[in-house]
């Protein structure tokens, strides 16, 4: 149970509902960003991220920088691509497309492999693209928040590494880290960029990322300097290494309060095996998806294997408008999100199920949401045919 | 008085001590970043910034973006300069120099007018530089946190606008906004970039800025697109305008908790006339500077007119090491900062006096700090000669 003031239950695909202790950490008294107590907190936070990403390689490098999740795209664009280099973007929705737009700003030649809405690019076409030219990077959106499509990383990585071993594989994990299994070392990933406010369960305001030794080598081997100052991994890398070694260091002032909250959130996540956490997210997701199907609704992600476990994007019945349904859900104390994929925006809604809403069943969020959805559709005049 | 847990009093030049209500706002329950309650909070926050910056011009544009204060430099570099354009950087320390480094990343031809440590570039040399070539921008650090040198803006602006009317005047106000008078309209400023964690009194994690209509025109007139995605003012401008018009809008997820805290901090600041706030900072600064002088110490900022009112950088006696003094202050419950200006780093310390430590005398921070400094110097064997 939560001791927070009564408020609508936020079940959008991020920001999510937060744990009480995490929110309390947000109001931590002021500390120096280079003082020993905060340096220790930040250092432990970086070390805990290695566990969350399942990496023990000493050459893996975590980064925690004040910013939105979007800043992670700029980290990739400004540091790992040089003007004129080729990037293959695997797109499963709005966020894949825009990752590509970001990389173009930094001079990348971007090829987008764009799947039809609700599906994902398939390995044979990816393999064909990789054989057609030399790509510096392949980017993939693990879960595209606009569609709820889950991409498969393990086989993708094997394909990339066998066809084009020098190509870096970069994952947008904003809507997947801490709700989907990500084995950074075992799957040979070169970068995962994410944000604090989704399944990690810490308020928005932190860009969180992990890069492989190979990605750091690509950074060091650049012919041109990084194309950003604030988003320069060259500027931040020694700072992160110093903090993790518990040494004070300065490039730009971090947010002690947000880092405290992240420390609390990661400490909670790591009290149990990650496999349990991912299994719980899958179990609750299966329950939600069954309820959605039982209501006669179709998911945007058409193939069950391509469906994320931390969110569900569902098409509405033709007779029901999102602008009618969402206020009815809100009246029942449940906030869902509308659609943001341009091709289908008005035709679907999104239900986020990550973090405490999944792991703390006493909150009753999921049952409340399913009941609100059932009643809301009925109030909109919908009956399963 | 504060109801926060007992902790050392943080009197570095940012982050500062925070008000209880501001810290409580940091633990606000989770809200949708596009929901009506948060949209209203963000919109009001942007409107309050207009008052803090003393601008009523409808063409002035405030921005609040997740990031460190340093991100403000990238906003300037990626949006207001195009490769090959000239920038004149007025430097009064570490932060002026590094603003210049940031602008070079974006292709600017940077000329640095660098004053000797403790002073500032003078108007005749600035005028001469402005006449020597066409500058797209002049940048000035209002208070350089590394030296405590205060730059003069009103006469500087008159000089720039009379000698080179097309040149944009951009102010780094990280260590001055809300402790020094800044009259955005009256002084014809084109941009002020700042951060949340200093005199504004909100925890770190927000880049806060105001740009003039003329700066926005320069943005719109660019031949090349902005050189950043996350720091693109073209991407953020419609979002800020929508929030201020209380309309939901999305580019990248803001931090609702930090924006709530900023809303609380600005609401508190604006309950009284700004002139009172600046006078109070001056009064307390004068008292501190007198105490420092009475102790026989010299300030880094040598000319009284060039001394900031929100911090004091003071040289230590030759016999006293910062590494000896700072721990003694900490034992008395007071945290000062060491030096960061490379030429003098080990020879001085910095005392920040902004926000509640100045405006809430019941906290007793200033008297406690002066007593700790006096005793600390004595414990280090120093006696005024």
Image: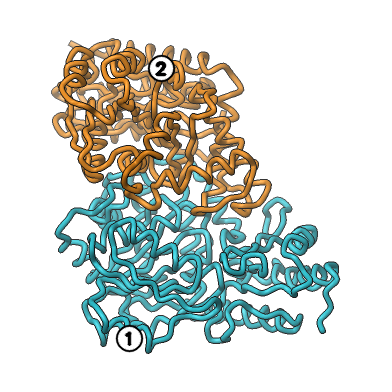
Chain colours: A cyan, B orange
Q: Secondary structure at mark 1?
A: helix
Q: Secondary structure at mark 2?
A: loop
Q: Position of residue A275 (x, y in %)?
A: 49, 81
Q: Are marks 2 and 1 on the same chain?
A: no
User: Dividing the image into 4 quarters, which one contains the N terminus of chain A?
Assistant: bottom right
Calculate the distance from the C-alpha at mark 2 to the C-alpha at mark 1. 60 Å
User: Which residue: 47% across, 39% down?
Assistant: B63
Label 1, on which residue? A127
- Location of residue B343 by image quarter: top left
Q: Which mark is residue B258?
A: none
Residue found at the far bottom of this picture: A124
**Can residue B112 be seen?**
yes
Q: Residues within 10 Å of mark 2 (few under 14, many from 20)?
A: some
Residue A169 vs residue A14, the one in the foreground: A169
Q: Position of residue A113 (x, y in %)?
A: 40, 76
Residue A153 vs residue A27, the one in the foreground: A153
Decide: is A247 above or below B324.
below
Q: Is residue A284 left or right of residue A306?
A: right
**Can residue B119 be seen?**
no
- Location of residue B87 by image quarter: top left
Q: Position of residue A193 (x, y in %)?
A: 39, 64
User: Dividing the image into 4 quarters, which one contains the C terminus of chain A?
Assistant: bottom right
Q: Residues within 10 Å of mark 1 (few under 14, many from 20)?
A: some
Q: Chain of mark 1?
A: A
Decide: is A344 above or below A133.
above
- Location of residue B296 by image quarter: top left
Label 2, on which residue? B187
Q: Position of residue B164 (x, y in %)?
A: 27, 20
């Amino acid at each position: 149970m939560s001791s927070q003031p009564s408020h609508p239950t936020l079940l959008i695909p991020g920001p999510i509902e937060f744990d009480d202790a995490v929110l309390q950490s947000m109001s931590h008294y002021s500390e120096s960003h280079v003082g020993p107590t905060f340096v220790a907190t930040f250092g432990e936070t970086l070390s805990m991220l290695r566990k969350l990403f399942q990496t023990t390689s000493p050459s893996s490098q975590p980064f925690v920088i004040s910013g939105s999740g979007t800043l992670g795209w700029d980290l990739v664009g400004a540091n790992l691509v040089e003007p004129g280099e080729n990037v293959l973007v695997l797109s499963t929705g709005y966020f894949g497309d825009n990752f590509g737009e970001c990389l173009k700003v930094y001079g990348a030649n971007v090829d987008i492999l764009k799947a039809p809405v609700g599906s994902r690019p398939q390995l044979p076409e990816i393999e064909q693209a990789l054989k057609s030219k030399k790509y510096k990077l392949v980017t993939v959106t693990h879960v595209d928040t606009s569609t709820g499509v889950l991409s498969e990383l393990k086989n993708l990585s094997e394909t990339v590494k066998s066809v084009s071993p020098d190509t870096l594989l970069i994952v947008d994990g904003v809507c997947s880290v801490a709700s989907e299994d990500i084995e950074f070392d075992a799957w040979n990933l070169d970068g995962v960029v994410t944000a604090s406010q989704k399944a990690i369960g810490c308020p928005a305001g932190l860009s969180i990322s992990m890069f492989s030794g190979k990605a750091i080598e690509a950074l060091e081997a650049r012919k041109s300097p990084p194309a950003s100052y604030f988003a320069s991994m060259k500027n931040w890398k020694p700072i992160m290494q110093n903090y993790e070694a518990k040494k004070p260091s300065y490039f730009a002032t971090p947010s002690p309060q947000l880092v405290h909250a992240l420390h609390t959130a990661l400490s909670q996540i790591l009290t149990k095996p990650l496999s349990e956490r991912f299994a719980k997210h899958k179990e609750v997701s299966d329950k939600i998806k069954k309820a959605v199907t039982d209501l006669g609704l179709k998911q945007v992600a058409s193939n069950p294997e391509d469906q994320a476990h931390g969110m569900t994007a569902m098409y509405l019945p033709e007779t029901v408008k999102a602008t009618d349904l969402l206020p009815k859900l809100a009246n029942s104390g449940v906030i869902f999100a509308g659609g943001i994929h341009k091709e289908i925006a008005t035709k679907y809604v999104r239900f986020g199920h990550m973090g405490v809403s999944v792991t703390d069943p006493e909150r009753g969020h999921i049952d409340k949401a399913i009941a609100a959805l059932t009643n809301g559709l009925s109030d909109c005049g919908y009956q399963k045919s």
